[in-house]
Amino acid sequence: MTAGTTDNTGNIDSGYPGQRLGLPAAGVGSIARVGRRFGALAIDLATATIIAYAFFPMIDDVTGFRNANPLASNIIFLAVQVIFIPTVGGSPGHRLLGMRLVRLDGGWTGLWRPTVRTLLLALIIPAVVWDADQRGLHDKLAGTVLIRA
């Protein structure tokens, strides 16, 4: 579909993700695309699992193998999100893959936005419900956008 056309629901196509938000189509400041997002999520989840494995192991009674505690891994993942977003502008995975989380008006995210965003991220569903700008429901409710740095 070309920019400005109408789709089968009667909505006007905005051309590219982020155009309605005043963001560029590509490069610095543009909407972070799906591949980078999944890559950052994989980095953050792997890091949390490694930390949980090292400091909060569980020993399987049947096999005797040492495993990462899944509860500890999830808590570490969520804590990293809440701590790193307001301090460095994104999780370690975001920053490693060249992304940062900002408010729509460009100001500091503060503390409540990363907390709300992370709690919604933990529910999973808000993170996979996207709008035309490729913003998850968790970002929409927190008033944030994940952009390329």
Image (tube, rainbow, N blue to C red):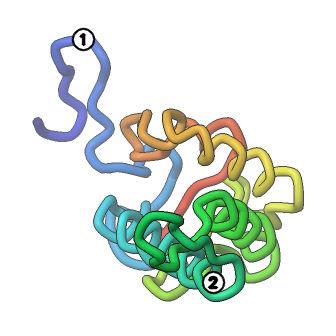
- Callout 2: 10 Å neighbours few (<14), some, many (20+)? some
Residue closest to the far front: 62
Q: Secondary structure at mark 1?
A: loop
Residue placed most toward the observer, 29 or 76:
76
Q: Quadrant of residue 130?
A: top left
Taking the image as drawn, is residue 149 in sight? no
Q: Nearer the viewer, mark 1 or mark 2?
A: 2
Report the quarter where the N terminus lies: top left
The answer to whether residue 47 is left or right of residue 101 is left
Q: Is residue 39 visible?
A: yes
Query: What percent of the width, then of the height, locates residue 58?
Result: 61, 71
Point out residue 114 in the picture as x, y percentages from the top left corner. Answer: 76, 57
Residue 28 position (above or below residue 124): below
Q: Residue at x 50, y 43 (%)?
A: 127
Which circle marks residue 66 in the picture? none
Mark closest to the chain's N terminus, 1 or 2: 1
Residue occupying image coordinates x 71% and y 84%? 55
Q: Amino acid at mark 1?
A: Thr
Q: Which residue position is annotated with label 1?
A: 9
| Circle 1 crowding by C-alpha within 10 Å: few under 14, some 14–19, many from 20 | few
Would you say 122 lies left or right of 111 here?
left
Above or below residue 21? Residue 77 is below
Q: Quadrant of residue 108?
A: bottom right
Q: Which residue is under mark 2? A: 51
In the displayed image of the protein, which residue is found farthest to the right? 111
> Mark 2: which amino acid?
Ile
Q: Secondary structure at mark 2?
A: helix
Residue in front for this viewpoint, 118 or 36: 118
